[in-house]
Image (cartoon, rainbow, N blue to C red):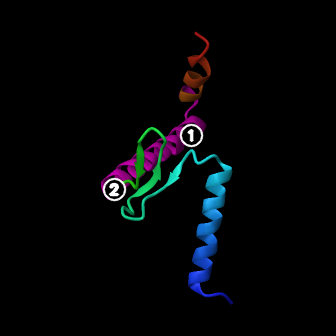
Amino acid sequence: MGSKASNSKKTKDKAIKTDKVLGNKFKRSDPKDPDILVNLPAGLKYKVPGKRQRVIIGSIVIGLNVLLVISVLVYFYSPSFQDFIYNFGRG
């Protein structure tokens, strides 16, 4: 088994080769700032989202999923809602 240092060097060499093959459009993040994931060519930097942003986006996704499940249940159990959905795009 190889040591961690040799495995790290192999991974780093592979990343450098991959960057050369791809034309180096996207630069790897600077090791000085671990929050930056990707440096884009136009000087834009994609950073790791903060905790508040992850909570907000997760809440939106879960809320929309709950709304979808409720609407499907109402569709199956309410004939008037079925008629509404059926006729919604017709008129």
Left or right: 80, with 42 as reference point: right
Q: Which residues are magenta?
A: 51-80
Q: Position of residue 19 (x, y in %)?
A: 61, 54
Residue furthest to the left in view is: 52
For disc 2, the neighbor class at 10 Å (few under 14, some 14 to 19, many from 20) is few
Which quadrant holds residue 90? top right
User: Of circles 2 and 1, which is in front?
Assistant: 2
Which quadrant holds residue 86? top right
Residue 65 falls inside the magenta stretch:
yes
Residue 38 falls inside the magenta stretch:
no
In contact (CB < 8 Å): disc 2 and disc 1: no
Quadrant location, the N terminus: bottom right
Q: Is residue 67 above or below residue 7?
A: above
- Cα separation, mark 2 vs mark 1, equals 33 Å
The residue beneath circle 2 is: 50
Left or right: 53, with 30 as reference point: left
Which quadrant holds residue 84? top right
Q: Which mark is residue 46?
A: none
Q: Amino acid at mark 1?
A: Val
Residue at the image position 41 percent from the left and 42 percent from the top: 44
Front residue of 17 and 90: 17
Q: Which mark is residue 72?
A: 1
Q: Position of residue 45 (x, y in %)?
A: 41, 47
Left or right: 44, with 84 as reference point: left
Q: Amino acid at mark 2?
A: Gly
SS majority, magenta: helix
Looking at marks 2 and 1 on the same chain, the residue that comes earlier in the sequence is marked by 2
Front residue of 68 and 54: 54
Residue furthest to the bottom in view is: 1
